Amino acid sequence: MQTLQDAAGLRATIRGWRAQGHTIGFVPTLGNLHAGHHSLVKLARARTDRVVASVFVNPTQFGPGEDFERYPRTLAQDQVGLAEAECDLLFAPDVATIYPFGADRSVSLHVPELTETLEGAHRPGHFDGVATVVCKLFNLVQPDIAIFGQKDFQQLKVIERLVRDLSLPVKVMSAPTLRAEDGLALSSRNQYLSPNDRATAPLIYETLQQMRDLIAKGHARKVVEQAAASKLERAGFVPDYAAIRRAEDLAEPADGEHEGLVALIAARLGTTRLIDNLLFD
């Protein structure tokens, strides 16, 4: 596997592949990779001739007081895992490559409506940073297919809207969330959990399943949401939200609407903020 940090080298390599008629799959990441990331690379490997992954801890998607400085930088370990997953090229740019005028002076993209609820309400500006860096990376890599995990469900919806609205020639694909045996969604942030908190964390997935089952039985959405938040609080979580939304656009469903829904939870456990979701269909 080749590793490049400069845009010129990346583009030269991409041009060579294109000249050979190869299709290109892309998996953008923040790094500190785990089996969930590797599964996305393997899916890209099955769908395209060449696979590019990026590792870039993007400063513009971290808000004040968030974990940008302590986010694990594990490039050597990531290289090993990506090579084993049959990635062809790792693009690992520095901040100056992505933001040549500085991160605080960059052109910024805003996707309306989808970015102003749930995660967007609790992390103002987060999705502007995500949309901006993803658009920049798409422009650099110019993939045919880009693959994202469903664990960051709202992010997936934002990127789908971005691609459609800007007419970007990229097909966005999603892959199911990978979970530990006890149901906890795989995440780089799981390593921050204390042993006791790690034992408690799977309750998030259990709560999502309960939300789905109660809606299927005809319970009122707001009652189900409130019960889910209370259950998490009793277990020691500090929930930001426990919500049921339309999967298509994250709008609040009408009373009695049971199909095409998704439950989403964000909650702090100790010092760690966890997110997860469950599609009902």
Image: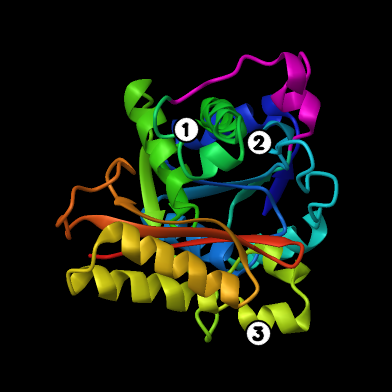
Residue 266 image offset from top left, x and y in percent: 55, 57
Q: Residue at x 63, y 81 (%)?
A: 200
Residue topped by disc 3: 199
Residue 116, numbered circle: 1
Quadrant of the rendering where the N terminus is positioned: bottom right
Mark 3 and mark 2: span between their CA atoms? 29 Å
**Which range is magenta?**
93-111
Q: Residue at x 33, y 57 (%)?
A: 222
Is 18 drawn above or below residue 204 in the view shown? Answer: above
Is 131 drawn above or below residue 276 in the view shown? Answer: above
Occupied quadrant, residue 234: bottom right
Majority secondary structure of the magenta segment?
loop
Left or right of 225, for residue 14: right
Occupied quadrant, residue 145: top left
Q: Nearer the viewer, mark 3 or mark 2?
A: 3
Residue 253 image offset from top left, x and y in percent: 23, 48
Q: Helix or strand or loop: what does disc 1 sit on?
A: loop
Q: Nearer the viewer, mark 2 or mark 1?
A: 1
Residue 32 image offset from top left, x and y in percent: 72, 58
- Residue situated in front as seen by the camera: 83 or 190: 190
Q: Helix or strand or loop: what does disc 3 sit on?
A: helix
Can residue 158 be seen in the rendering of this structure? yes
Q: Residue at x 36, y 32 (%)?
A: 161
